[in-house]
Amino acid sequence: MRKICLIFIGIILFLAMSVSVLLSHISSTVSDKNLFSNTLEKANFYDYFYDSLITLLVEDIVENGYEINGTNQNSKLVKFYDNESAKKSINLYIKTLISKEYFKEKTKLTINQILMLVNNENHDLSIDYDFDIVMKDSITDFRTLSKDLKFAQLIKDILSVESVEILQPLTEDLGFEYTEIEIKTALDDIFPDEWIENNLFIIHDSVIYFIAKDTDSFLVTIPIDDRLELAADVIKNKLNEDDILYDLVLKKLLNPLLENNLSNITNFGYGITVTQEEVLSIFKTLAPKDWVGMHGNNIIDSSVSYLISEKDDLSYSIDLSDRKIAAAIELRKFGKNKLDTLLSELPACQNFIQSSLATSSIAKKNKPSCIPGGQLAINIFYDDMIKIINDEIDKFISDQFPSKLDLTSQDVEGLIGDNSEFIKLRKNISDGYSLTNDDLISLISSEERSVDIEDIRSLLSGNINNKNLETIIGLEIREIDEIRSYINQIKLMKTVMFAIIFMLVMLFAFVSIKSANKSLRFLVSIRNTSFIFLISSLSIGLIIQSVKLIDITPYLENISLPDIENTFPNLSKELNSNNFILQIVDIKDAWINEMFISTLIYILPSMIFFILSFVYIKNKEKNKKGES
């Protein structure tokens, strides 16, 4: 019966020790600052992540390109000019920026800090990745990367998409449109690669100096007034094609201004009238394309001078004195032709009364109903009629046709844009394009979270703490209290198991004493308990090693990552490949090896106690036999 009890106690002790070893190793994994990171180190996970996963992530990003969503729900994909070259350049930049040793060091630091936080050894998270130092050392490398990837041209590709969205509604109102090729050519003229690169480097360096606290605040100002003059040349070249500028200036500017001065219908006498449309049509024939184009270009130049603050308003004057003289000549021809047509259509007067009425009408400059004396008598009053018509035309030209058109700021704004937007544009051009603290704050903050500039500076410099994680990323550090609760439960269970093991050992020793000689009873209990401890520990160690032989590959192969697969196909393929599965298996084996090592705290002491007690008892028994 006693043997059965000992066997039963031994089995329970074995099970208790097994659970204790497992709980102890899990507890050590989540609490020991070195065990988990060392496990990853032994499995070469840091090297694998750095050499393979980061490289594949870069490849996916390069192959995916950058999608720009337009305001009209259209999208455009901007890609690198040479994907293979881009992959090599970006990977080289990243590996230069973040060395493998730096990556290992900071990853281990992160693991240690998180473990200390979840184990309540730290109440505040504080990790300094030294991004400010790393970025300052990489300024030259970024310039090399920019040239390798042709950043300037990529930026212009993005700008061309955005420009189509912006220009399309504006140019449609003006009666023309830019093609994508024309926009790209225009951007090349306005923003040469060197100009874009220089300003890109200024922004990049300013961000780094801000992160490194070399400056008190973030401020970048890019002058763009000189770009406006180039843009004006591009616009003029476009508008001078296919009579665009000619029609634009006539229809939207000159004609409306002339309409304000001209009557709807003007009577030159004898029933000869001219409508506003006829006068404008005559003016169009008297406005040569080069003359209209010259004034159109001058209006654009005047607008540019206003936008770059060389002028205080948008006013512009057009001298019409030459056009006025030409208009008078054309209107005289117009009046003569109308009179000739009128007279050719009138019949001869048939009697004295008709002749008297017709003569009276002519004297009153009214349209006669017939010609006194017939067609042969026209010359008697024709010259006088022409003179009267010409006098009326001269009076019309003098009274209604201006010698000069004064375009006010409102007139020009009506041609090229909204008043408030134009004033805002002028201010932006005058001040230059600026990036400030507020831009960084608006970029990172949201309706749910408001941040200050120091939080942003701290985060960008790699100084991670509770405050910037909560305010910027939205990660609530308090949420790890639940994890802490689980860890505390594991630690409590481990302590309970130690107590159970202790009680089982005492019980086993007590039961085994009853079967021993009184003089060696204590030593026998030590021998028996150390033996059962040794056997249990060795069995546990054997089981742990046998667990390594369990093939978990089928379980890992069934894991799918659909979201990653769509976005990062190369990375997803690697995460489902044998390479990654073997890496997980290596981590599992390294973790199990660490657990096997933890069984030595049971094996070695129990082995020592067993051997010593066994030898001592044997010697005692041998001496006893010798004495007897």
Image (cartoon, rainbow, N blue to C red):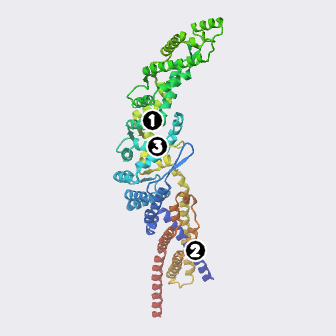
Residue 419 visible to the viewer: no
Callout 1 amino acid: Asn
**The image quarter in which residue 217 lies:** top left
Callout 2 amino acid: Leu
Residue at horizontal 41 percent and vertical 51 percent from the top: 462
Q: Is residue 598 above or below residue 365?
A: below
Residue at horizontal 55 percent and vertical 75 percent from the top: 550
Q: Which badge, 2 or 1, is on the more N-terminal residue? A: 2
Q: Depth-wise, is mark 2 or mark 3 nearer the camera?
A: 3
- For the residue pair 388 and 259, the one nearer the viewer reads as 388
Q: Which residue is mark 1?
A: 240
Residue at horizontal 62 percent and vertical 82 percent from the top: 4
Task: Determine which of the numbered discs, if any, sits on residue 81 in the image.
Answer: none
- For the residue pair 318 and 110, the one nearer the viewer reads as 318
Q: Which residue is mark 3?
A: 182
Give how far apart the Cα atoms at labels 2 and 1 are: 93 Å
Badge 3: residue crowd in 10 Å (few <14, some 14–19, many ≥20): some
Q: Which badge, 2 or 3, is on the more N-terminal residue? A: 2
Badge 1: residue crowd in 10 Å (few <14, some 14–19, many ≥20): some
Q: Which residue is mark 2?
A: 15
Give how far apart the Cα atoms at labels 2 and 3 are: 80 Å
Place of residue 583 in the rendered image (x, y in percent of width and height, measured from the top left): 49, 68
Q: Which badge, 3 or 1, is on the more N-terminal residue? A: 3
- Tag 1's secondary structure? loop
